Image: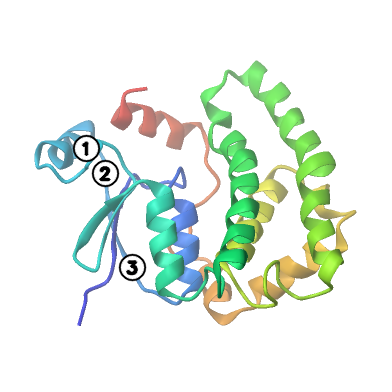
Amino acid sequence: MAGKPKLHYYDGRGRMEVIRWLLAAAGVEFEEVFIETEEDLDKLRNDGRLMFGQVPMVEIDGMELVQRRAILNYIASKHNLYGKDLKERALIDMYIEGMADLNEMIVTLLEYTPEEQVNRLALIKEQTTNRYFPAFEKVLKSHGQDYLVGNRLSRADIHLVELIYNLEEFDPSLTANFPLLKALKTRISNLPNVKKFLQPGSQRKPHEDMKTMDKAREIFRF
């Protein structure tokens, strides 16, 4: 029997949180090996465990996978969260790439000065309500189904609901004019595996702050 996946990253959301969400939604228990110092990261590199010298890295099924998209694709495929055919997979990929553009703005927000963050946050909110949320609301309205693709749970639903949670931490009113997205969030949040992940004490990481970002800067030297 294969052991639990092991996630190698620092103790924060960063670029690993989306992987935590997907594993949790799939009902997969996982372990975390936190990178706490730049020496920890150097050891992984020097031991040849990071193909391109960077994390996230996930040990799973005898592999040491890097590159977030490759990791997510593998997990989603293994746990039937990636559509039933090529057409559905293409739609899922398209939706996820759109989410990734917005999510990148969130992940990198704290890399800016406090003054710049004000403008960046305003841009995030504007893009959310005028570009991204309307697009996904339209998808749900167009087919009248409970999920984005194929009327079944996919990684697209999970990633979108994670994104909604992240955005609502900045402004809870962002979903006010998007009833179908609010319903999707409720629907996914009530799935037993996701509901468990959303409870206090789970492996879900808290909202990033400057302390977490400073720690990441120390480890990754940026």
Quick one: SS at disc 2?
loop
Looking at the rendered structure, the kind of residue marked 1 is: Leu
Name the side, left or right, on which 157 lies relative to 143. Answer: left
Looking at the rendered structure, the kind of residue marked 3 is: Phe
Q: How far apart are marks 2 and 3 (CA)?
A: 16 Å
Q: Name the residue under label 2.
A: 35
Residue 208 vs residue 221, the one in the foreground: 221
For residue 165, which quarter of the picture? bottom right
Does 73 sit above or below residue 42? Answer: below
Q: Name the residue under label 3.
A: 30
Label 3: how many Cα within 10 Å (few below 14, some 14–19, many 20+): some
Name the side, left or right, on which 155 lies relative to 130. Answer: left
Quick one: SS at disc 1?
helix
Residue at (58%, 74%) from the top-left corner? 195
Q: Is residue 202 visible?
A: no
Q: Are marks 1 and 2 in contact (CB under 8 Å)?
A: yes
Closer to the chain start, of discs 2 and 3, is: 3
* Residue 28 on image: x %, y %: 39, 74
Closer to the chain start, of discs 3 and 1, is: 3
Q: Mark 1 points at which residue?
A: 41
Q: How far apart are marks 1 and 2 (CA)?
A: 6 Å
Q: Do the residues labelled 2 and 3 touch (CB within 8 Å)?
A: no
Q: How far apart are marks 3 and 1 (CA)?
A: 20 Å
Residue 49 vs residue 222, the one in the foreground: 49
Quick one: SS at disc 3?
loop
Looking at the rendered structure, the kind of residue marked 2 is: Ile
Name the side, left or right, on which 47 lies relative to 51. Answer: left
